[in-house]
Amino acid sequence: MLLSLTNLAILSVVATVSTVEAQQKTGRTTRYWDCCKGSCGWSGKASVNQPITSCDRNDNPLTNMGAKNGCENGGQAYMCTNQSPWAVNDTLSYGFAAVKLTGQNEGTWCCACYKLTFTSGPAAGKTHIVQATNTGGDLGQNHFDLAMPGGGVGLFNGCTSQWGAPPNGWGQQYGGISSRSECDNFPEKLKPGCYWRFDFFQNSDNPDVTFEEITCPKVLTDRSGCIRNGQNPT
Ligand SMILES: *[C@@H]1O[C@H](CO)[C@@H](O)[C@H](O)[C@H]1NC(C)=O
């Protein structure tokens, strides 16, 4: 009798734990900074007040949302430098990401915000809240490609035409630079986001995450200009 009660108690604990875990979505991350106009910068991607703001070569916000991507020949629209990550304190930071979610499309995630909690690597346990500004043809499912200057240009490179970065961008094409001191030579406005990777993020290498969608914080939409219809960021 005692034995079966104990077994029941253990069973109920296991059941409770697996219910909680089932509500958490898991995902993976990579990193990039390609300087290109994000795909959520085009009209018609999602139901929003206006697309993600892009900037000209000198980092001035563009009002023409149809401006050609600077990553194409003759294009003049680039990712604005203020779409870099920044830390509030040692456990919370904000930023932007290219996103791909299982079974969904840009209409679902463009300009949506996600609370990511790192679950592996040196930043495990820390929270990074991101707004989706972009997607990527090489992203997998439930994949957040975190925007951070010096994170590698990936498939496309606008950093050479915008900032005179080396032909494959700063550092490796995938993964970017490898040491904090390399940020010292970055354009002034990209330095803080470059240092974020080695300070708050502790140079994590593509950590896993759990994530949930949240109403966008105003600190993010103030930078991007994009608010999903029905949301009231505070
Ligand atoms: C970090 O800032 C957030 C938001 O202000 C706050 O809730 C949290 O307690 C802070 N964490 C630490 C360790 O100070």
Image (cartoon, helix red, strand yellow):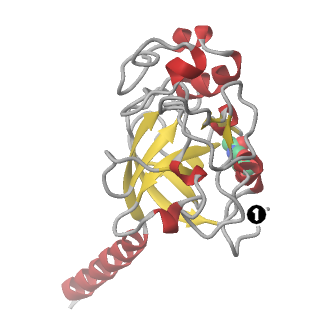
Question: Quadrant of the image for the C terminus?
Answer: bottom right
Q: Which one is in front, 84 or 129? A: 84
Residue found at x 70% / y 16%: 188
Farthest front residue in view: 74
Residue found at x 51% / y 62%: 109
* Number of marks present in the image shown: 1
Q: Secondary structure at mark 1?
A: loop
Residue carrying label 1? 233
Tell me where residue 117 appears, x and y as whole percent: 50, 51
Is residue 131 visible to the viewer in this orientation of the structure?
A: no
Q: Is 198 drawn above or below residue 134 in the view shown?
A: above
Q: Residues within 10 Å of mark 1 (few under 14, many from 20)?
A: some
Farthest bottom residue in view: 1
Residue found at x 64% / y 39%: 83
Label 1 beta carbon within 8 A of ligand 1: no
Q: Which one is in front, 227 or 125? A: 227
Q: Which one is in front, 162 or 72? A: 72
Q: Quadrant of residue 152?
A: top left
Q: Quadrant of residue 75?
A: top right
Residue found at x 37% / y 57%: 142
Tell me where residue 73 appears, x and y as whole percent: 48, 29
- Left or right: 42 in relation to 10: right
Amino acid type of disc 1? Answer: Pro
Is residue 67 visible to the viewer in this orientation of the structure?
A: yes
Tell me where residue 11 appears, x and y as whole percent: 27, 80
Question: Quadrant of the image for the N terminus?
Answer: bottom left
Q: Quadrant of residue 215?
A: bottom right
- Left or right: 217 in relation to 206: right
Tell me where residue 52 appears, x and y as whole percent: 65, 51
